[in-house]
Image: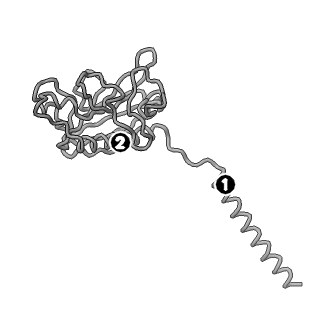
Amino acid sequence: MCIKSKNKKAFFLIELIFVILLISFFSYIILPKKIEPEFDTAINRLIIYLNQTKLQALIDDKFSTSNPLWHKQRWTLKFFRCRKSVGGIYYSIYSDKNMSGHPGSDDSLKDPLTKKNIYSSNSCQENSSNSQYVLLTKKFGIQSINMSCNDTSSLGQISFGNDGNVYTRLSNIDNDNYAYLLENDCLIEFKSKNKQTKSIKIYAKTGFIEKQ
């Protein structure tokens, strides 16, 4: 009788362990996983894009002895405001082949994962050709940007040279190849709709990019 009781208890414990394992397994499958906050998603993707832009600049040398304004074709990330009727902020990454100051989607860098253009127009409309990550306000609730190294009348931009240098804008002067060279570390601060802030730092001497 005592042996049977012990066997029943042992069997019950095995069943209990099995049930607990089953519950743990199905909980892992069914319950939603922890999702990265949208704000972090936007900043992390922007860091990836900035590093991609820096790499693209290193392998795609724009120097030309026949074009005194060749530096205007440097690979650049620039922040823009959406048109007033839409509101918000977006960015594009491009090399302005025609040096018109108005680069289009054909000038833009492509996301290596999705093969979409890292680009938008000021209509800030989603489409199948452009990366959603550029729509900072519409997709991620980012309300404002402040760049400590902004040398433009716009929200700001960062350009990379094939020499590893970082520039804060593109010069309009012939052979002015080192104008607007980043002398001090640049801090780009983003503020969300919930008044949270996150920053990206670009180091002047190395071009290293990190989240603060």
Image position, residue 12 (x, y; %):
79, 72
Q: Quadrant of residue 186?
A: top left
Give the colour scheme shown.
Answer: one colour
Front position in the image: 193 or 67: 67
Residue displayed at 28% across by 30% down: 157
Q: Which quadrant is the C terminus positioned in?
A: top left
Crowding at dot 2, Cα within 10 Å, few <14 / some 14-19 / many 20+, comes out as: some
Image position, residue 133 (x, y; %):
43, 35
Marks 1 and 2 sit apart, C-alpha to C-alpha, by: 34 Å
Q: Which residue is mark 1?
A: 27
Left or right, 54 with reference to 175: right
Residue displayed at 33% across by 28% down: 79
Residue displayed at 17% across by 31% down: 71
The amino acid type of the residue labelled 2 equals: Ile
The amino acid type of the residue labelled 1 equals: Ser
SS at circle 2: helix
Image vertical order of residue 173 relative to residue 9, above or below = above
Q: Which residue is mark 2?
A: 47
